[in-house]
Amino acid sequence: MIDFGRWIYSKDIAAWAAKNTSLNLEEQIACIWAAPHRTLEEKLEGVKELKSEHDGKLLKDRIEKLEIALHRSRSDTRIYVYLFGIEIFFRGEKDCFLPDTIFRSAGEAIDAICYHIEKAAREEHLERRNWCGIVRGFRRSGKPPHGYVPIENTIVRYDGEVIYVQNIYSRDGGYMSEGIDMGYFDAVKVPYSSGTIISIPKNPYIPELKGVLINMTEPDEENFPDDCYGQWLIYPTRQHRDQTHGIGVVNLRDDYIPFENSPDFIFPYKQLMTVYEGDLKEDETWMSEFSALIQADKNCIRKIWRDREPKKCRYIAMNDERLNYVRELWEKQR
């Protein structure tokens, strides 16, 4: 059986999953693929270990795809129909010092990422592990208008090790690289009760974040593991000014990153979630009051859903409006 402690970054989620979750083969593979702290090579070995308990076409197919992805990411072979660009991120936000450079192989692109990260870390006296890189793969389109279309993102650690390969459908609809989608992490739950203030701490891949968790079914209820779509994160946002009161809502089953300044790639951010135990900042006052409200009556999320209709040009004092909105919910609850 899969070792959750090895493949799930969050110790709390791993401990809960080990006691409460029974995964089928496809879910076990997805859990291994989604690990943000394991390299592609480690993931390949992890999937191969499943052969001791499973067999058949599905496992063979996944192993073959991982082997192809690993080989391609290390290749220095130049192929006319492919081009590669790079981006570098520091703690989840794009670093804009890179020159516009195009590479003819994935291996050359990864070497360039390592070079630029090493240079930036040395010049700015920062740890290399705070950075990551993206190799964006393009393929020459076979349909007019002719040009290069994006097909694949490869997420690279500071040391050049690949951790994810994620496909993109080409705009002409005529091509997709070998079927790999390594970012989905929906097989397990975040095992905290409603009203818990949780955080995504500093990491190389996405910006840090705090938010309030709401469950439709609580962790101490029998059907909690089976309620696939019943977890929500309420978080502060400035990204969409037409969303009500500067408060964002995301279902934790979603496989995209909705937070501000986030890189444009899928990342299993649930893996990084933990209980926030520090002091809240002055502009986060609303969060502590909202946490208490949710613990008293979590049904207020239904009003939040109804309230999220577009409004024109909401340039607002974010904390004041969030706080006033939460206090209005309190009054209606009483």
Image (spheres, grey):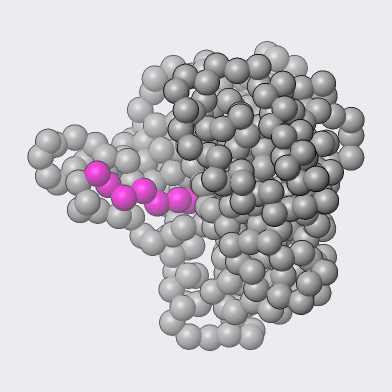
Q: Quadrant of the C terminus?
A: top right
Q: How many marks?
A: 0
- Quarter of image, res 190: bottom right
Q: Position of residue 294 (x, y in %)?
A: 77, 48
Which residue sits at x=46%, y=78%? 58
Q: Is residue 152 left or right of residue 140?
A: right
Above/below status of 274 relative to 147: below
- Closest to the observer: 171 or 162? 171
- Quarter of image, res 30: bottom right
Residue 169 counted in the magenta span: yes
Q: Position of residue 163 (x, y in %)?
A: 58, 49
Above/below status of 56 relative to 254: below
Which residue sits at x=63%, y=85%? 53
The answer to whether any part of residue 76 appears in the image is no
Which residue sits at x=61%, y=29%? 245
Q: Position of residue 80 (x, y in %)?
A: 23, 41
Which residue sits at x=76%, y=22%? 283
- Quarter of image, res 276: top right
- Closest to the observer: 48 or 265? 265
Residue 12 counted in the magenta span: no
The answer to whether any part of residue 55 appears in the image is yes
Q: Quadrant of the N terminus?
A: bottom right
Q: Magenta region: which residues? A: 165-171
- Closest to the observer: 229 or 333? 333
Q: Position of residue 127 (x, y in %)?
A: 74, 27
